[in-house]
Image: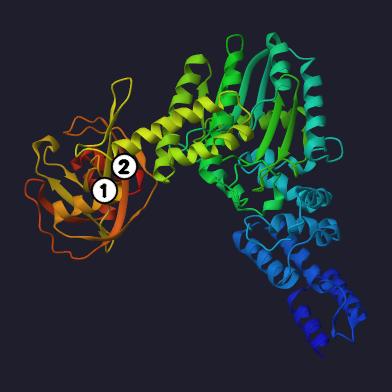
Amino acid sequence: MLTLAILYLYDLTFKTSEFYFQLIGALIVNVLFWDLTTKRYLTKFSAPFTLIWKWKAKIFLTDPSPQNLTKLKEFFKRWILKDDSLTREFIDGLSDKSAAALVITLQGEKDIKQSSSLKFSDFKTAVSKASKWHEYRRFLLKKATSDFPSTQKIVESLPPLSDYVIGDDLKLVSDDVFSKKLDDTDNEVIHIFTTTSQLSSDFITTISNHKEDIKTLHFYICSPYIDTHKSLLDLKQEYENPAFTRQWGQFVDHADYGVNIEADMIRRMIKILGAIRELSKLSKDLNIELHLFTERYPGVKIKMLEQQGYAQIQPGPLTYANNIYRFAVDVVQYDQIKTLKEDLKNFRESNQVETIKLDSTSRKAITEQAIKEMCQWLYTQGFTSKELSSSQKRIRDTAKDPESDKIINDISRTLLKVSELLKTGDQVSEIKSPDGTVTHFSVALMIEQNKEILLIKKSDSFYQEKYSIVAGHVNRHETPVEAIHREVYEELGVTLTSPQLIAPAFLLDDACRHGGNRHLWFVFKAQLTSQNFILDSSEISYTKFVPVEKLSGYTDKLTPGALGVLKQLGYLS
């Protein structure tokens, strides 16, 4: 009776006759595998559930919406995995379609139950099977080329590079094909996409040997700026996958095998700076344009030789931190190369990349800015020089860069200096740069109610009667949290309850009456114990709540610091 009810339900739900007949067959198989003694199925999971799971995977590949991904994940956990752990036997028994469903499902599921015996090699088994399913390959290609709309329309017609080899085999085949193409070219314009990886010595040697044949090298990589740009922090999603999906030693891990996020961000930055350093050595004899991904890594690796009329597209839009699931397709027809070339031009001109002409001077500036921003970010995360010292060997071993220790030591000294500044004295905390720039630490509180923002008018003539937000400096003996408690009480006469940072600390170029010309801002939100403000007339002459939609009319009436903070937080454009 239950079986008939299930069949009737699915007859109403699924109108595809192929699926309907497959489901009937699966139910019959289940009946044959029913053990009357134990009153349970002999199989690990029922065939109908597997069939539905694959069907849901196909729906997602056709329409990769967040809702469809959620349905796929929830079905897997409830009906396929149930309360069991993911095992090697499970993966070995998967079909190509089921393997593709698993690869998609496991993204972001770092806490899923998994057998302790599962290894990276088991994940390689799954991705190898998955790569054989056409629908899955098509999904990867279309998602990977989403930033290249004209190319996206033609990717399904592109031929595979050596029968969809993946992982290490793909790298060998891809590099070999690319190198041979480069042997027979002149006045070439090259495009190379990568994530954060260092350049191999083979690649550097190949480019160096052909520098007379190369007109321009366009090199695309994630930005090393952790504050100015978002692409580096966007890679944090790679830490949310199950441990067995990554190769041991790929990240900087804690002793419990969890990822040490702050230390690994340093590793990634070092690898990016290493790639830029190696390229800059070639810039004396070669025109190199560096394109930094500002928002995110676009999920694709592209190698292109414009003059040769050849390109490889390697889709990598999933959140796994390795290349083992990638395959490649060739772009060889003239009209297709022209299409890709135009897409790349539009991509470079978009706000998704920042282009820098690479030479020794720009390389030095990039390195200094990246390290400065990393120090600021680490401080906002509460990451100390002591923690950095304990992670130094792991960072060095995984980054595999000759300048690792130098960069780590620079960061450590800065963190230690900031820590000491905040411990001693009552003066405003400040750091003086070699160029004479004075950076202060500042705090602010966003007070918002009924979609209105509290603005205050400063009393000090320095601020020219302009409006600001509740804000002030961090003194050397204070933490930012202590400083915001003090400032709010001094300016408004009220106390705070559990102030929370609403954004990572950020740097603004704004002058103050204490001689600072830059400020590292810590912006909080909190509950106030009272709205009955007792103003300090020496600090504030007036307060008012301004509707958020009317803030744009105050841009000329705001102090530079308040204007910068409101823009940074998205209240003003």
Count residues near mark 2 (Cα–Cα under 10 Å), then give few for <14, some for 14-19, many for 20+: many
1 or 2: tag closer to the N-terminus: 1
Residue type at mark 1 is Ala
Q: Position of residue 77 (x, y in %)?
A: 69, 68
Task: Give the side of residue 136 with respect to residue 413, left or right.
Answer: right
Q: CA distance from mark 1 to mark 2?
A: 7 Å
Residue type at mark 2?
Trp
Quadrant of image for the N terminus: bottom right
Hey, which residue is sitting farthest left in the picture?
537
Residue 169, visible in the rendered structure: yes
Residue appearing at x 72%, y 19% in the figure: 307
Quadrant in which the C terminus is drawn? top left
Spot the residue most to the right. 32
In the displayed structure image, the side of residue 355 where residue 192 appears, left or right: right
Q: Which residue is mark 2?
A: 521
Choose between 519 and 396: the one closer to the eye: 396
Residue 402 vs residue 216, the one in the foreground: 402
Label at residue 444:
1
- Can I make out residue 210 in this image? no
What residue do we see at 23% from left, 31% from top?
516
Q: Mark 1 and 2 residues: CB-CB less than 8 Å, in contact?
A: yes
Disc 2 is placed on an element classified as strand
In the rendered image, the vertical position of residue 402 relative to residue 69, given as above or below = above
